[in-house]
Image (cartoon, rainbow, N blue to C red):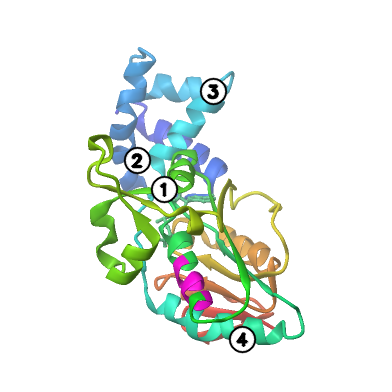
Amino acid sequence: MSASGSSYSDRFRVLIRSLTGISLPQSKVVMIEQRLRRRVMAFDLPDTEAYLEQLLDGQGMEEELRIVIDLITTNTTSFFRESEHFDFLAREALPQRLAAAKGTRRPRFKLWSAAASEGAEAFTSAMVLAEAQRRGLQFDFAVLGTDISQRMLERGAEAVYAADQLSTVPPDLVKRYFMSSRHPSVAGKVRVVPELRRHVRFRHLNLMDETYPVDRDVDLIFLRNILIYFDQGDQERVVQRLASHVATGGYLVVGHAESMVVRLAGLKQIRPTIFQKV
Ligand SMILES: C[S@@+](CC[C@H](N)C(=O)[O-])C[C@H]1O[C@@H](n2cnc3c(N)ncnc32)[C@H](O)[C@@H]1O
């Protein structure tokens, strides 16, 4: 880092915060700078500070900002992560929401994975819902996955994963919902079957935006392992905005490290990490 490192890193943190809401701790700035080094070289610039100048200048840098967002976001995810949430979906949320929709000829269950990363949460939800249909429940479902990272959204839409990412998926579900090919170009890869993919859409959405172009009668929103990156004010605003998209009687589910964050009149805590809109 250059002599004016601290002011540079402060400006960098402000830029990231304004773009993503992510509060980068000082300790992470060095790591991020290392990740950005390749971009500095790509532009043939002397150092990260010069690169940042260019970014802040903004002219024609939209694509570059997207790359920076991809580089700084933590996209860790997995199928059936925090699996009790999917038990809750199958055993409680779905039957209760369908009971509430009694009288509708074929109710439609809407689920939103609001920090979807590459789609494992969205496709796990879709598998759980498809399994409920197989058991004879009469309903349709739609899963929306949103994220700030275009790269992750592209992966989600492609729905191709490394075969070893399926270690947490029960074998019968692997058989039913993933396909592989003998073609050498896709060795070690699997793809979600089209019958499941057709229920799942991915769309770009920044949770820091003032409004979200999403339906306001969502049955269950997953907002997991994302609030931890935001400061308290942003956490509260994001929860409030998302809550306004949950149907009355529907659910907001956060990650295990995040339950303390949700304190909102109108959301009743029914498990440490699960909140119901009343
Ligand atoms: C750690 S992953 C969590 C993935 C999944 N929810 C899970 O629990 O497995 C966090 C995701 O949040 C996304 N993210 C970060 N800031 C965001 C923002 N302001 N708006 C939307 N998504 C954001 C990141 O790109 C990343 O894919």
- 65 drawn magenta: no
Query: Which comes sooner in the sequence, label 3 or label 4?
Result: 3
User: Magenta span covers which residues?
Assistant: 127-133
Identify whether 86 is placed above or below 229: below
Residue topped by disc 1: 24
Q: How many angstroms separate mark 2 from mark 4 (CA)?
A: 45 Å
Residue appearing at x 41%, y 48% in the figure: 24
Q: How many angstroms separate mark 3 from mark 2 (CA)?
A: 21 Å
Mark 2 Cα-neighbour bin, 10 Å: few <14, some 14–19, many ≥20: some
Q: Amino acid at mark 2?
A: Val
Q: Amino acid at mark 4?
A: Gln
* Residue 173, percent from left and from top: 35, 68
In the image, taking residue 255 as reference, residue 103 lies left or right, namely: right
Element assignment for label 4 = helix
Q: How many angstroms separate mark 1 from mark 3 (CA)?
A: 21 Å
Q: Residue furthest top?
A: 44
Residue 96, disc: 4
Residue appearing at x 51%, y 37% in the figure: 15
Mark 4 Cα-neighbour bin, 10 Å: few <14, some 14–19, many ≥20: some
